[in-house]
């Protein structure tokens, strides 16, 4: 595979990672599936990539003071423990030839719910500067994220961000930043579990991460220039786009699904880069 293309893919997806707090595996896993990787290979590569993109985005959000450390660590550690429970389940699916149908189908169900939760009108919701939830609620949230991370090959951020916004009432920027820290704990543990038993194409992973280190900080910075509703709506449409692309894959229209997901990813990248460029020009003028 073209290494320049891998860097570009890593960059574009990590822009979304830093902006949405999703780690990157949320988009990369279905993209790798569409490119012909087996589900297990796609999951392992995505987890490694997500480590790099989450570190870069985490550092950028740290400088912006968006991270709620206590909540992030509780969710992250409980999620990391849950990854160890989920791994045998994934191997069982693979050994019974169920991974190519069960994993995408489960993905589609979750995408349907979260796209709805991000796009629906929310009445009388007051944004908070901290979660204010019990440790047990945060632990349950982390367990869910960890299980989904290992099962679906995502960082868990696509699960955490909408729930932190809709159920815990966090502003989008705080939810995104806190999610990235938790994602780092979760994917690091999940990756170690997978890589011991699953071969990984290290060259592919390395060039993807190279792009991630460049793009994720820019995505994180862009959150400062968008309103909360705008971020939620863009995330909701990302869920819908990913749903459509995976549904098309299930009916053997892989190429069409690949281009739909790629076009939306590029659209969001252009939107963020244009906004960053305009803000830089305004800062230079003033």
Image: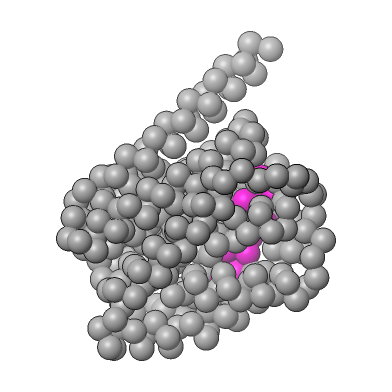
The magenta segment:
173-186
* Relative horizontal placement of residue 113, taking residue 30 as reference (left or right): right
* Relative horizontal placement of residue 147, taking residue 106 as reference (left or right): right
Q: Residue at x 19, y 51 (%)?
A: 255
In the rendered image, the vertical position of residue 198 relative to residue 115, given as above or below: below
Q: Is residue 111 visible?
A: yes
The rendered magenta stretch, by its main secondary structure, is classed as helix
Give 124 or 183, whichever is nearer the viewer: 124
Q: Is residue 66 visible?
A: no
**In the rendered image, which quarter is residue 79 located in?**
bottom right
Give 207 or 82, whichever is nearer the viewer: 82
Give 27 or 124, whichever is nearer the viewer: 124
Q: Residue at x 20, y 56 (%)?
A: 254
Give 67 or 109, whichever is nearer the viewer: 109
In the rendered image, residue 219, in percent from the top left (x then y), is placed at 53, 41
In the rendered image, residue 276, in percent from the top left (x then y), is placed at 54, 28
Q: Residue at x 49, y 70 (%)?
A: 149
Residue lying furthest top in this view? 285
Q: Is residue 218 magenta?
A: no
């Amino acid at each position: 595979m073209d290494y320049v293309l891998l860097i570009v893919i890593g960059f574009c997806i990590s822009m979304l990672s830093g902006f949405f707090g999703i780690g990157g595996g949320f988009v990369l896993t279905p993209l790798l599936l569409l490119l012909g990787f087996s589900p297990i290979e796609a999951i392992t590569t995505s987890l490694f990539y997500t480590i790099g993109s989450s570190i870069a985005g985490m550092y950028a959000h740290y400088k912006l003071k968006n991270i709620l450390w206590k909540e992030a660590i509780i969710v992250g550690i409980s999620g990391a423990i849950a990854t160890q429970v989920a791994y045998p389940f994934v191997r069982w699916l693979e050994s019974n030839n169920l991974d190519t149908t069960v994993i995408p189908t489960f993905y589609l169900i979750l995408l349907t719910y979260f796209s709805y939760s991000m796009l629906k009108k929310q009445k009388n919701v007051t944004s908070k500067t901290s979660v204010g939830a019990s440790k047990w609620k945060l632990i349950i949230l982390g367990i869910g994220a960890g299980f989904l991370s290992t099962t679906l090959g995502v960082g868990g951020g696509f699960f955490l961000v909408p729930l932190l916004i809709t159920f815990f009432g966090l502003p989008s920027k705080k939810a995104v930043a806190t999610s990235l820290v938790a994602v780092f704990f979760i994917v690091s543990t999940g990756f170690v579990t997978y890589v011991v038993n699953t071969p990984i194409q290290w060259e592919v992973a390395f060039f993807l991460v190279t792009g991630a280190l460049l793009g994720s900080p820019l995505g994180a910075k862009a959150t400062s220039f968008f309103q909360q509703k705008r971020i939620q709506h863009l995330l909701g449409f990302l869920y819908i786009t990913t749903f459509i692309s995976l549904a098309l894959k299930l009916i053997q229209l892989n190429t069409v699904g690949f281009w739909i997901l790629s076009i939306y990813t590029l659209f969001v990248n252009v939107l963020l880069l244009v906004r960053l460029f305009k803000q830089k020009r305004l800062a230079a003028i003033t």
